[in-house]
Amino acid sequence: MSVGTATRHRRMAAASTARHPNEMDAMRVIRAIEQRERYRYVHPTVSPVESGYLVRSPCCSRNIDPGGGEIDVAWLDWNERQRQWTLLRKDHKADCWIEDSRYARLGELLMRLNGDPQKVFWQ
């Protein structure tokens, strides 16, 4: 393989590498949800998924899981082509994700997730 071909392969590999999930933004999400307004006494988890992060938490209200098991709270999905975040909430009755809002910046998304005045995330 020539040097030029090797360089092209490296550039193509770098271009196809996803920006999210990454460790730095995962830590930003973890630190941010510690400041949320609802159910501050439970300890949510943040897991990397293909293009973002999944937030799960024990169900302390027992509205979704009477046993208090861990439930999906939010999916933070990065769209590389549109260069924006989509915040999705879980419809637990229908067992599907519903788009809540879109943001150019992760910080704005985290403010929405933490505030949650309608209790659509932290149920």
Image: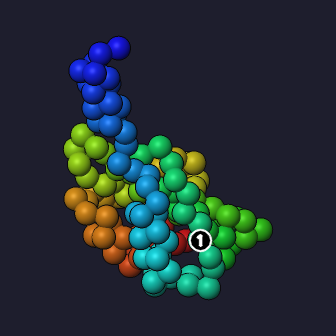
- Residue 15 quadrant: top left
* Residue at x 23% of width, y 48% of height: 83
* Residue at x 36% of width, y 70% of height: 110
The residue under label 1 is 44
- Residue 4 quadrant: top left
* Residue at x 32% of width, y 30% of height: 10
In the picture provided, is 26 more to the left or to the right than 110? right
Q: Nearer the viewer, residue 15 or 29?
A: 15
**The C terminus sits in image quarter:** bottom right
* Residue at x 31% of width, y 45% of height: 79
Amino acid type at image mark 1 = Pro
In the picture provided, is 92 more to the left or to the right than 37? right
Q: Nearer the viewer, residue 5 or 99?
A: 5
Helix, strand or loop under label 1:
loop
**The N terminus sits in image quarter:** top left
- Residue 76 quadrant: bottom left
Could you say where residue 47 lies in the image, as x and y percent from the top left? 55, 57
The answer to whether residue 118 is visible is no
Position above or below: 7 against 32: above
The answer to whether residue 47 is visible is yes
